[in-house]
């Protein structure tokens, strides 16, 4: 087999053990690592077409994988003004006014990443933004991706003048007089605005996605578990690969909505395993609830506003039946479950599915996404059931506070807010914990995700106290959460997640050892080289 890539003068870090291998060089061919050895013997394997890179003592480890991200839908969503850095309403208004000055007559003002904490004690509504939205059609995505703030003009264009009923857990938030405030909760309500707002073309989405994927590769990502295979996402992935612009290896989970019929479910099963060289459909994404910040999570007891009491599926038993059917078909599932009742129901469904198909056992890797607040008895169920815990530690870091004065914590109350994002408890209880960003909900750089799992502080101000430092992961655990555990969640532990012979040549090369760099400095550690299938997708000029 021809040697495509040779890396020399490296320190090869095995995330399975946290130890350096006794080798300084590796060779790859056919997308896999073929040889490990010293510089002299590996250099001898290079041919005239081999890419040879001296990494000059840098650390070579398994490629970092984001366990939960939205490359295509996120690319479209982030075409507007970025509001994620706005900590208060004056900053939001200034950013919107600046963007509004660039609009053509009649153009829509789009924004994303709006943090409800910016509203302080005021209700989240268009009125709080003042005159900046007067006369403008505007649609601003809140950071959680489950809510949207629409201006009065946008509401008019969509014909929204009061409350409506929805089959799913969705709401047009209205004031005491029945007038819409502009806040729309969950997809069914948000889609009323999206139906009248201008949409980018397929070419524009593809170009933006290619740009995002290149940036992800430059940040050290070699792969991701993509949770956005709805709409035209699969066609976009195919087009990106045809253009040579798919910089990451993606495992894609299409959505199953509560109103899907038997034919739709059968089509999702049929799609499994389809894809290309760097992407494939592998799993199904379901939603058991919304978000705590919106009051649309499913909690066992109402939040402090009397909300978050219902499942996203109008009939939770139908969700249980869907999990059983997918399990029988050998299809792994990923369930968005944030509140304690949602997580418990998802675990119950997996347990029933496994009991109904004892031969399948734990071969089908089911997972639960987010798991923001759960009691002890729920934590201890993940390990025995083999359910993967997919966690996003930077959600806790960036959108909650140690003193529980943030919107998320105030809604939950002191007891439940103290059970925030229990990464360490789940790990210690035997769960496979996979780390991710949920981009564009939080920034995608994987070193920042790993750092957040270790220090539990807001990335924008590392002098702030940590939220639940007892839930911090060790440096090795954080690295494993984006390497070996990501491979295990995908059923690929025998072919991915470690820099060893026979595994995929997906590699991330860092300037220093990520296990010894301080957690507060890890996010700034230089990424020197990223390799997918033996092909560099990012190369620092210093190499």
Image (cartoon, rainbow, N blue to C red):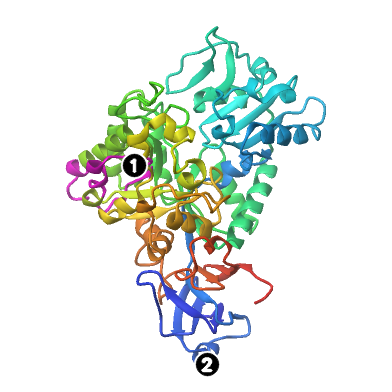
Instruction: Give the mark nearest the N terminus, 2 or 1.
Output: 2
Residue 474 position (above or below residue 152): below
The residue lying toward the viewer, choosing from 470 and 381, is 470
What crowding class fits label 1: few (fewer than 14 Cα within 10 Å), some (14-19), or many (20 or more)?
A: some
Q: Position of residue 49 (x, y in %)?
A: 62, 80
Magenta part of the protein: which range?
A: 354-382
| Residue 87 falls within the magenta-colored stretch | no
Residue at image x 31%, y 41%?
326
Q: Is residue 277 visible?
A: no
Q: Judge from the rendering whether residue 507 lies leftward or rightward of residue 322; answer left or right.
A: right
The mark closer to the camera, 2 or 1, is 1
Q: Quadrant of the C terminus?
A: bottom right
SS type, badge 2: helix
Q: Which SS class for mark 1? A: loop
User: Residue 156: horizontal and vertical position, in percent?
Assistant: 67, 15
Q: Decide if residue 222 is on the left or right side of residue 328.
A: right
Q: Above or below — where is 71 with respect to 12?
A: above
Identify whether 444 is placed above or below 58: above
Residue depicted at 76% across the width and 32% down the height: 97
Residue at 56% over, 56% down: 445
Write the residue at 46% across / 78% down. 12
In 3D space, how far apart are the residues under numbered discs 2 and 1 (Cα atoms)? 53 Å
Q: Which residue is mark 2?
A: 40
């Amino acid at each position: 087999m021809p040697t495509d890539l040779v890396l020399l003068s490296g320190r090869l870090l095995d995330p399975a053990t946290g130890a350096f291998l006794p080798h300084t060089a590796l060779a790859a061919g056919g997308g896999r690592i073929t040889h490990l050895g010293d510089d002299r013997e590996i250099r001898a394997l290079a041919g005239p077409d081999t890419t040879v890179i001296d990494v000059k003592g840098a650390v070579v480890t398994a490629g970092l994988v984001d366990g939960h991200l939205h490359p295509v839908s996120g690319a479209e969503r982030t075409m507007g003004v970025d509001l994620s850095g706005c900590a208060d309403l004056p900053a939001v208004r200034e950013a919107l006014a600046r963007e509004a000055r660039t609009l053509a007559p009649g153009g829509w003002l789009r924004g994303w990443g709006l943090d409800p904490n910016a509203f302080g004690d005021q209700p989240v509504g268009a009125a709080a933004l003042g005159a900046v939205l007067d006369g403008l059609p505007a649609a601003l995505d809140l950071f959680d991706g489950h809510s949207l703030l629409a201006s009065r003009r946008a509401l008019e264009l969509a014909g929204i003048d009061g409350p409506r009923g929805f089959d799913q857990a969705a709401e047009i938030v209205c004031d005491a007089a029945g007038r819409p405030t502009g806040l729309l909760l969950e997809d069914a309500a948000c889609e009323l605005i999206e139906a009248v707002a201008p949409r980018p073309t397929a070419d524009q989405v593809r170009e933006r996605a290619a740009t995002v994927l290149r940036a992800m590769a430059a940040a050290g990502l070699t792969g991701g578990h993509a949770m956005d295979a709805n709409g035209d996402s699969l066609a976009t992935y195919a087009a990106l690969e045809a253009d040579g612009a798919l910089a990451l290896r993606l495992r894609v989970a299409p959505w199953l909505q509560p109103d899907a019929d038997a034919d739709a479910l059968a089509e999702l099963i049929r799609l499994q395993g389809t894809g290309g060289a760097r992407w494939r459909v592998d799993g199904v994404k379901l939603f058991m609830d919304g978000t705590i910040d919106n009051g649309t999570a499913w909690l066992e007891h109402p939040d402090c506003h009397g909300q978050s009491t219902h499942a996203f599926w109008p009939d939770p038993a139908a969700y249980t039946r869907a999990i059983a059917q997918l399990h029988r078909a050998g299809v792994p599932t990923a369930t968005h479950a944030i509140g304690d009742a949602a997580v418990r129901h998802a675990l119950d469904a997996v347990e029933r599915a496994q009991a109904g198909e004892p031969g399948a056992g734990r071969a089908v890797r089911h997972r639960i996404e987010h798991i923001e607040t759960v009691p002890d008895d729920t934590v201890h169920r993940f390990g025995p059931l083999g359910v993967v815990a997919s966690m996003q530690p930077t959600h806790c870091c960036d959108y909650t506070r140690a003193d529980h004065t943030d919107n998320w914590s105030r809604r939950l109350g002191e007891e439940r807010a103290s059970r925030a994002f229990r990464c360490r408890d789940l790990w210690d209880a035997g769960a496979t914990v996979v780390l991710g960003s949920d981009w564009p909900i939080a920034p995608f750089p994987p070193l920042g995700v790993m750092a957040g799992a270790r220090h539990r502080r807001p990335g924008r101000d590392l002098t702030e106290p940590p939220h639940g430092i007892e839930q911090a992961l060790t440096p090795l655990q954080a690295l494993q959460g984006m390497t070996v555990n990501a491979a295990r969640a995908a059923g690929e532990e025998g072919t991915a997640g470690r820099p060893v012979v026979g595994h995929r040549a997906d590699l991330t090369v860092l300037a220093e050892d990520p296990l010894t760099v301080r957690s507060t400095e890890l996010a700034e550690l230089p990424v020197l080289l990223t390799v997918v299938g033996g092909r560099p997708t990012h190369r620092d000029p210093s190499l």
